[in-house]
Amino acid sequence: MLENGKMKLLDRIKKLATLRFFLLFLILTIIVVVAMGNVTPQLLALSGGAPILDIRPGYTYADVEYLFTVLGEQGRQLYTTLQVLDLIFPLAYGMTMTLALTGVITRLFPEGHPMEKAVFIPILGMIFDYLENFAIAALIASFPNLSPLTVSAASVFTQLKWSFIILTVVLLVILAALVLIKKK
């Protein structure tokens, strides 16, 4: 049953894998990156240069406690604003990467090839990004009463998000190179 559900989702993704939808999500990604780019420097200034949790490879309870303390109330409110923008960002970049990956995979492999399932890799990154965002929002809301379990979960979600994003980018580069080689 689960396999059938994956195939239906894969068919829907293939239908969306047009240049028009790819460009739509790419433009949305760029717009959100620019908007987030206006907030992030303010957070870095308030934190004394300590990076926000989302861009770290992982973090500890002490890291979160330190960051939220140095940010102060104003910084935590600003971080919450960034979290609102980050509700759009995973969908935007996740779909951009999914559609790009679908495009190169369909050019390289025949219908039904096991490699088609790789289009789910950026979707997993997107899911872990949302889980990370919800966990970070819960941490901000509960500060100074941080839950060690929530901190650990948020850090694991961040690590998984980055793992799937990096895997997607590496896969895209390799497969795009193969498409170019195949054209020659």
Image (cartoon, rainbow, N blue to C red):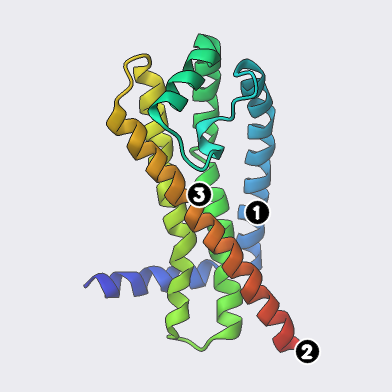
Say few, some or many: other residues with alpha carbon within 10 Å of mark 2 (under 14 / 14 to 19 / 20 or more): few
Say few, some or many: other residues with alpha carbon within 10 Å of mark 3 (under 14 / 14 to 19 / 20 or more): many
Three-letter code, disc 2: Lys
**Which residue is label 1 attached to?**
26
Instruction: Tell me what residue is drawn at x 50 percent, y 17 percent.
Output: 76
Instruction: Tell me what residue is drawn at x 59 percent, y 25 percent.
Output: 50
Q: Quadrant of the N terminus?
A: bottom left
Measured Cα–Cα span from mark 1 to mark 3? 11 Å
Disc number lying in front (3 or 2): 2
Among the 4 quarters of the image, the one containing residue 5:
bottom left
**Which residue is label 3 attached to?**
91
Residue 102 position within the rendered picture, expressed as x and y whole percent measured from the top left: 54, 71
**Which residue is label 2 attached to?**
184
**Could you tell me if residue 18 is visible in this image?**
no
Measured Cα–Cα span from mark 1 to mark 2? 27 Å
Work out whether residue 61 or residue 29 is closer to the camera in this orientation and state it. 61
Work out whether residue 5 or residue 126 is closer to the camera in this orientation and state it. 126
- Relative vertical location of residue 73 with respect to residue 79 in this rendering, above or below: above
Say few, some or many: other residues with alpha carbon within 10 Å of mark 1 (under 14 / 14 to 19 / 20 or more): many
- Relative vertical location of residue 104 with respect to residue 49 in this rendering, above or below: below
Three-letter code, disc 1: Leu
Three-letter code, disc 3: Leu
Work out whether residue 65 or residue 140 is closer to the camera in this orientation and state it. 65
Among the 4 quarters of the image, the one containing residue 46:
top right
Residue 98 position within the rendered picture, expressed as x and y whole percent measured from the top left: 53, 63
Residue 3 position within the rendered picture, expressed as x and y whole percent measured from the top left: 28, 74
Q: Would you say the residues marked 1 and 2 are in contact, meaning their CB atoms lie under 8 Å apart?
A: no
Q: Residue furthest left?
A: 1
Secondary structure under badge 2? loop
